[in-house]
Amino acid sequence: MPILSTTDLNVSRLCLGGNVFGWTADEDQSFAVLDAYAAAGGNFIDTADVYSAWAEGNSGGESETIIGKWLAKRTDRDQIVVATKVGMLAGFDNQKRDTILTSAERSLKRLGVDHIDLYYNHRDDPNTPLEETLAAYDQLVRDGKVRYVAASNFSAERLARALEIQEREGFAKFVALQPEYNLVSREKFEGDVRDVVAKNGLATVPYYGLARGFLTGKYRPGVEVHSPRAGAASKHLDEHGLQVLEVLDELAETHRTTVAAVALAWLAQQPTVAAPIASARTLEQLSDLTPVLELELTQAEVDRLSAI
Ligand SMILES: NC(=O)c1ccc[n+]([C@@H]2O[C@H](COP(=O)([O-])OP(=O)(O)OC[C@H]3O[C@@H](n4cnc5c(N)ncnc54)[C@H](OP(=O)(O)O)[C@@H]3O)[C@@H](O)[C@H]2O)c1
């Protein structure tokens, strides 16, 4: 298992995305997916206070609550790395000190744990001084409520600035970045952002590892997909996307595995990446993803996909 940058967290090569829990997967389905993921060797779960506030009847916190109930049934809480986030839930959508401290307490309660393993700043807040934000995260670490802190959706410039402040003030430093990054969305991460991550020894934990389902291969010309993600996912169905799918199909056949596993393996083998995040709504979907826990592409295969 890769160790997450400078931490002592051993994480599996697939991080399970939690935004489906309480949204497209009800509680029973979520428990089944979580059980199967852990049984396959997965130990890294990603959620956020805001998941999944956008679903009808929800107000946020549903995913954390389901994960909390699931953890309570298990005896291996210490083997599971739980990551959650603050900063996008209505009423708590900023990075002010009070928001961070209050939201952490609310997340701890919903998750039913005494500490969060990895706590993300979900989105940079240009309206709050970074010093105030970073001091609050540092306090959570000092108080033992959070083990490590991380950033999501930061620009290269703001990430570098945050790391400088953390260094200067002796604050707990960000150990990871969670950007959008996958085989068909590369430009925002590869380049300046990745350079800052690499230079500072952070780990990358990319989200939308499957480009919202596109990289499972289920979006094809003439095929209608029923999913709340279909609109955004099918945007990748252009010439470039089809070229990517063609090579993924071929490599999946070579390795006798799934298109999704090959796409996630490519991501897992990119510089600085510790574990891609992907979600599954059902056991069938999950079983297409878990082969990435073992799958290694050759360098030539990685290069071939990168070149498209
Ligand atoms: N930091 C951030 O700002 C941020 C933003 C977004 C997401 N995230 C995190 O990243 C995680 C992953 O993002 P995501 O779940 O939106 O996208 P994703 O992992 O790229 O796509 C997952 C979706 O693809 C479909 N899928 C998965 N396996 C499949 C299979 N075998 N066959 C067919 N379809 C399959 C499912 O959706 P359908 O069945 O509905 O098609 C599934 O929910 C989230 O859960 C969350 O933890 C973070």
Image: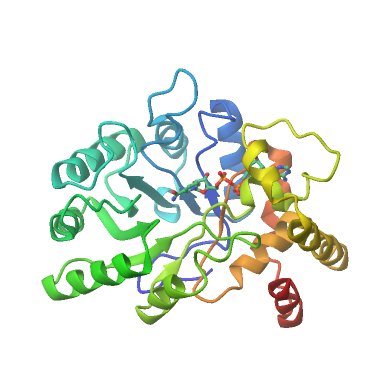
* Colouring method of the image: rainbow
Residue 306 versus residue 244 in the image, above or below: below
> Which quadrant of the figure has residue 155?
bottom left
Query: Percent from the top left, x then y, of residue 147?
Result: 28, 58
**Residue 124 falls left or right of residue 41:** left
Q: Determine if residue 274 is in view.
A: yes
Which residue is found at the position 38% from the left and 78% from the top? 201
In the depicted view, which residue is nearer to us: 34 or 76? 34
Give whichever of 100, 212 is nearer the camera. Answer: 212
Q: Position of residue 305 (x, y in %)?
A: 73, 71
Which residue is found at the position 61% from the left and 30% from the top?
A: 29
Q: Residue at x 71, y 81 (%)?
A: 299
In the rendered image, residue 266, in percent from the top left (x then y), is placed at 66, 68
Residue at (32% x, 69% y) in the render: 157
For residue 295, above or below residue 221: below
- Residue farthest to the top? 57
Camera-nearest residue between 115 and 213: 213
Quadrant of the rendering where the N terminus is positioned: bottom right
Q: Position of residue 258 (x, y in %)?
A: 79, 56
